[in-house]
Amino acid sequence: MPETYVVITRLVLAGILGGLIGAEREYRAKVAGMRTHLLVAIGAALMLIVSRYGFDGQGDPSRVAAQIVSGIGFIGAGAIMVQRHSVHGLTTAAGVWVSAGIGMAVASGLYTVAIAATVLSLIDLELLGWFFRNRKKAAEGEERDKE
């Protein structure tokens, strides 16, 4: 078992990294924001830490990891809405899922992987989001010009 401060540091880092993804979702006024992503990352990290160190080395932490992935799918499904043949919330659901993975990576001591996943997620949400929003606006402008 790692020292208590190491375990607490892992929980804090998981919360920070998950919170960064959630902050972007909050900024975009999406259904799951900073608090949700932060809690999902901390919760996933906590469950993996407990499964790994909480039972005197007995058991298989990979089983808990698999169940975290499945369970987060249910939370993500709650963020997805279908309205008039249009799907909303898919990116937010994916963000919650990634936040859980980031929490699991931090709990396992894979700090660089967790930070890289956070950076890549933010690049996707911000830069690619910006690109596609601008592309959509340009296409809508061309449609108006044709009329």
Image (tube, rainbow, N blue to C red):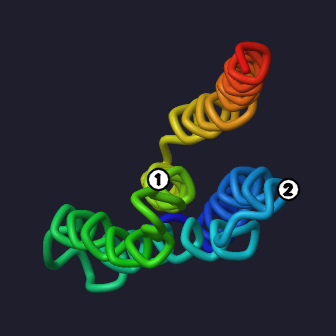
First of labels 1, 2 by sequence position: 2
Looking at the image, residue 18 sits to the left or right of residue 50; the answer is right
Residue 93 in percent (x, y) is at 48, 61
Residue at the spot of label 2: 27
Residue 136 in percent (x, y) is at 67, 26
Which residue is rendered at x = 63% and y = 76% of the image?
39
Badge 2 marks a residue whose secondary structure is helix
Which residue is rendered at x = 31% and y = 76% of the image?
71
Which residue is rendered at x = 46% and y = 56% of the image?
86
Q: What distance separates the C-alpha of mark 1 from that of mark 2?
A: 16 Å
Tell me the crowding category of disc 2: few under 14, some 14 to 19, or many 20 or more residues within 10 angstroms, Cα based.
few
Q: Amino acid at mark 1?
A: Ala
| Relative to 88, residue 115 above or below | above
Which residue is rendered at x = 79% and y = 15% of the image?
145
- Quadrant of residue 114 within the rendered picture: top right
Disc number placed over residue 124 in the picture, else none = none
Please name whichever residue, 131 or 73, is drawn nearer the observer in this view of the structure.
Answer: 131
Looking at the image, residue 15 sits to the left or right of residue 102; the answer is right
- Quadrant of residue 118 within the rendered picture: top right
Q: How many marks?
A: 2
Residue 13 in percent (x, y) is at 70, 57
| Relative to 7, residue 28 above or below | above
Looking at the image, residue 114 sits to the left or right of residue 126; the answer is left
Please name whichever residue, 116 or 27, is drawn nearer the observer in this view of the structure.
Answer: 27
- Quadrant of residue 9 within the rendered picture: bottom right
Residue at the spot of label 1: 94
Badge 1 marks a residue whose secondary structure is helix
Looking at the image, residue 73 sits to the left or right of residue 108; the answer is left
Q: Amino acid at mark 2?
A: Tyr
